Structures are given as C-alpha cells and as structure tokens.
Image: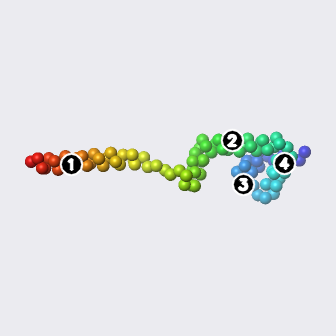
C-alpha cells in the first residue's frame, strides 16, 4: 500500500488548493481503494454542511445574481406615502372648510 495523504492534504484537495503534484498524488490514492473516495466524500459533505450553516452558499448565489438582497424598508414605503397623502388631503379639506 502506498503512502496516504494526510487530512490536511485531503482538505486542500477538497477546497481545490493543491498544486499539480499534490493533485496527482491524491487522485492516485483515491483510485487505489473505494474507501479512499468515501473519505474524500465525507470531507466534501462536511464542507457543504458548514457552507450552508455559515451562509456561504447564499453568498455564492448572490454573486451569481440568483439572490438579491431585499431592503427591509421597502415594505414601509407605500403605507407611509398613503399616510402622508391622507394628511395632505385632510389639510386641504380643512382649508376649504374655513
């Protein structure tokens, strides 16, 4: 059996941060045994769970334009305008009544 890559190297590979020699080493190791591939899949699954909990997945979707940030004040603009309009109309009505 050949040397195994350390956990740190597997994490680098999962993040796509390996150089060419490290990629070849890890890919050869992955081909040796199906259990090796399962180890890498566990790391990738863990990383995807972490990304979803930290909102990294949302940030990636925002960068692609799939999600736009909603402004919290947008919901209050129309009611505020209606209230202002009512006060203006009441003021005009009071002027006309005099």
Q: Where is residue 50 drawn, in percent x and y?
A: 64, 42
Between the C-alphas of marks 3 and 4, the distance is 20 Å
Marker disc for residue 89: 1
Foreground: disc 1 or disc 3: 1
Confirm or deny contact between disc 2 and disc 3 (CB under 8 A).
no
Q: Is residue 39 positioned above or below 67 on the image? A: above
Q: Is residue 83 left or right of residue 52?
A: left
> At x 55% / y 52%, what residue is drawn?
66
User: Does label 4 or label 2 sit earlier along the sequence?
Assistant: 4
Q: Where is residue 31 drawn, in percent x and y?
A: 84, 48
Foreground: disc 4 or disc 2: 4
To which residue does mark 3 refer? 17
> At x 21% / y 48%, what residue is drawn?
89
For mark 3, give the secondary structure: loop
Label 4 crowding class (10 Å Cα cut-off): few <14, some 14-19, many 20+? few
User: Does label 2 or label 3 sit earlier along the sequence?
Assistant: 3
Marker disc for residue 34: none
For mark 4, give the secondary structure: helix
Q: Is residue 83 positioned above or below 19 on the image? A: above
Q: Quadrant of the N terminus?
A: top right
User: Does label 3 or label 4 sit earlier along the sequence?
Assistant: 3
Label 2 crowding class (10 Å Cα cut-off): few <14, some 14-19, many 20+? few
User: Does label 1 or label 2 sit earlier along the sequence?
Assistant: 2
To which residue does mark 4 refer? 31
Residue that sits furthest to the right in the current view: 1
Q: Is residue 3 left or right of residue 98?
A: right
Label 3 crowding class (10 Å Cα cut-off): few <14, some 14-19, many 20+? few
Q: Where is residue 42 drawn, in percent x and y?
A: 73, 41
Marker disc for residue 46: 2
């Amino acid at each position: 059996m050949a040397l195994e890559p350390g956990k740190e190297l597997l994490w680098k590979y999962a993040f796509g941060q390996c150089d060419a020699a490290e990629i070849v080493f890890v890919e050869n190791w992955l081909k040796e045994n199906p259990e090796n591939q399962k180890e890498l899949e566990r790391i990738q699954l863990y990383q995807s769970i972490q990304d979803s909990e930290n909102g990294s997945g949302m940030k990636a979707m925002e960068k692609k334009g799939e999600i736009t940030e909603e402004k919290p004040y947008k919901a209050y603009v129309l009611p505020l305008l209606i209230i202002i309009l009512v006060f203006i109309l009441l003021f005009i009505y009071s002027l006309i009544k005099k």
